[in-house]
Amino acid sequence: MEGWCWALTLECLLGKSLFQVLESQSFTMNIKKVLPQLSVLPPPIPPLLSIPHRETVVNRVMNKLSLLHDKIYCALSGSAADAQTIAEMVNYQLDVHSIEVGEDPQVRSAATLVKNISYKYKEELSAHLIVAGWDKRGGGQVYVTLNGLLSRQPFAVGGSGSSYVYGFVDAEYRKAMSKEDCQQFVVNTLSLAMSRDGSSGGVAYLVTIDEKGAEEKCILGNELPTFYDQ
Amino acid sequence: MERHLMDSKIKGVSTGTTILAVTFNGGVIIGSDSRASIGGYYVSSKTINKLIQVHDRIFCCIAGSLADAQAVTKAAKFQISFHSIQMESPPLVKAAASVLKELCYNNKEELQAGFITAGWDRKKGPQVYTVALGGMLLSQPFTIGGSGSTYIYGYADAKYKPDMSKEECLQFATNALALAMGRDNVSGGVAHLVVITEEGVEHVVIPGDKLPKFHDE
C-alpha cells in the first residue's frame, strides 16, 4: 500500500487579491518505489518510521507542491509517481493552452485538466491533486479533484493526515482572513496533522500566491508551532 | 476524503461514534453522540445513550459493537458493585477501568468494543481512563474515541488546556462533539454530556439544532 502525504490548500480573500497557501510534508513510501532525493536543508528532526505498515521513509523532505503555471500550483498526495506524472502532463498542457489563448490560464482550466486525467484513468491512478492559484478573473481559487470530481472550495485538505484536522479547520477557518492569519492557520493545521499522522512529518512547505506572484517558503520541523502535549 | 472506516467490519448494530472524556479543575466531563448504525448505511437509532453509569460517580462510554459493549458493561457493573460492597467504600475509577480492561483483554478475540471510563473518587479526584480494543489500559488528562474521533485529533490537541473551568470544559467538549458529528457520517443526533464532580452527577443533553455551528453551516 502506498504511503499518502498531506496537503492543505486554502484561499483567503483580501479585497481583490487572493492569497493562497499550500503546504506539504515528507511522506512514507513503499520501498519498491524510490523518489529522487531533493537537495534541501536537512531537517533537524530524526527520520520517521511508519510502524504499523512496516514502511520506510524514502524521503523526509520531499516538496509536494508542484508548479503548474506561474500563479497556479498543485499539491500532491497519494502515489508519488502518479501524482508527479499528472502534474507534469498538466504543466505541459497548460503551457500549450496559455499560448493558444494568448494570456495566463485560469485556475479553473488547470483544475479541469487535472480532473480530466484523474477521471479518465480513475482505475489505474491513485493520486489526489489539489489545484490552487490566482487569476485576474476570479482572484484566488482552490479546486479539489479527488477521483475525477471537480469542486471549488474556500479551503481544502487532503492526504492521510487530513482526517485528523478536519475538526480543527472547520472550527478555525474564517472567510477573508489576512495573509499572515492565513499562513498561521495553515502552519498550525499542518503541525497538528504532522504530530498525529504516522505518514506525515519532516518540514512544512508553503506557497503563497497572489496578484504579484508566488512565494515559496520552507518551515523546518523544530520551528513549527507546538501544542499541548509536545 | 480518504479515511479508514473503523467500524465497517462490525456485524450488526455498531456505534460508529464519537466519545470523549476531559478532566477539568474539580471534575470530569464525559460525552458522546447518540447515533447507532448498521454498516454505516442505516441509522438504527438516533437517540441512544452511550453513557453508562457503572457506579455513583463513575461512567463509561462505549464505542464499537453495541451488543458487545452492552454485555461487557452489564458484567462490569455487577463486578464493580460487588467490589465496592466488599471494600465497604466507593470504588476507585481505576478499579472500574481495570474491571473493563480484564473483560476486554480476556475476551479479545470475540469482542470488538473500546471504552472510556471517567469519574471522580476520593483518592485521586477526577480521572479518565481508556481501554482500547485489545485491552490496553491508559490514563490520560483527556481522551477521544470512536470513528468520529479521527476528525477532531487536531482540534483537541490545539484547544485542550490543563485545569480548565467547568464552563470552558463544557464548551470544549460540545465543540469537539459538534465538529466530529459534522464530518463523520456514523456519528450524529444529540450530544450527551455528563459532568461528574465530588458533589454529584449532572446530565446535559444538547439537541442537534442547538449545537454550535461552524463556518460552512
Image (spheres, coloured by chain):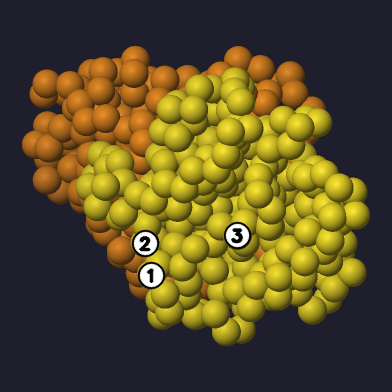
Labels 1 and 2 within one chain: yes
Q: Position of residue B178 (x, y in %)?
A: 38, 47
Q: Which residue is drawn at 75% across and 24% down?
A: A45
Rendered image: mark on residue A119? none
Q: Which residue is drawn at 66% across and 49% down?
A: B56
Q: What residue type is labelled 2?
A: Gly
Element carrying mark 2: loop
Q: Where is residue B107 in the image (x, y as percent from the top left)?
A: 85, 73
Q: Which chain carries label 3?
A: B
Identify the colour of chain B in the image.
Answer: yellow
In the picture of the structure, the residue carrying the numbered disc 3 is: B52
Left/right placement of residue A48 relative to residue A67 reads right
Say if mark 1 contacts mark 2, CB within 8 Å: yes
Q: Is residue B186 above or below residue A60?
A: below
Viewer-nearest of labels 2 and 3?
3
In the picture of the structure, the residue carrying the numbered disc 1 is: B46
Q: Residue at x 30, y 55 (%)?
A: B208
Between discs 2 and 3, the one toward the N terminus: 3
In the picture of the structure, the residue carrying the numbered disc 2 is: B189
Q: Which chain carries label 1?
A: B
Q: Mark 2 lies on which chain?
A: B
Q: Position of residue B129 (x, y in %)?
A: 73, 45
Per the model, the C-alpha gap separating discs 3 and 1 is: 17 Å
Between discs 1 and 2, the one toward the N terminus: 1
Colour orange, chain: A
A223 or B177, nearer to the observer: B177
Left/right placement of residue B61 relative to residue B81 reads left
Viewer-nearest of labels 3 and 1?
3
Quadrant, the N terminus of chain B: bottom left
B120 or A144, nearer to the observer: B120
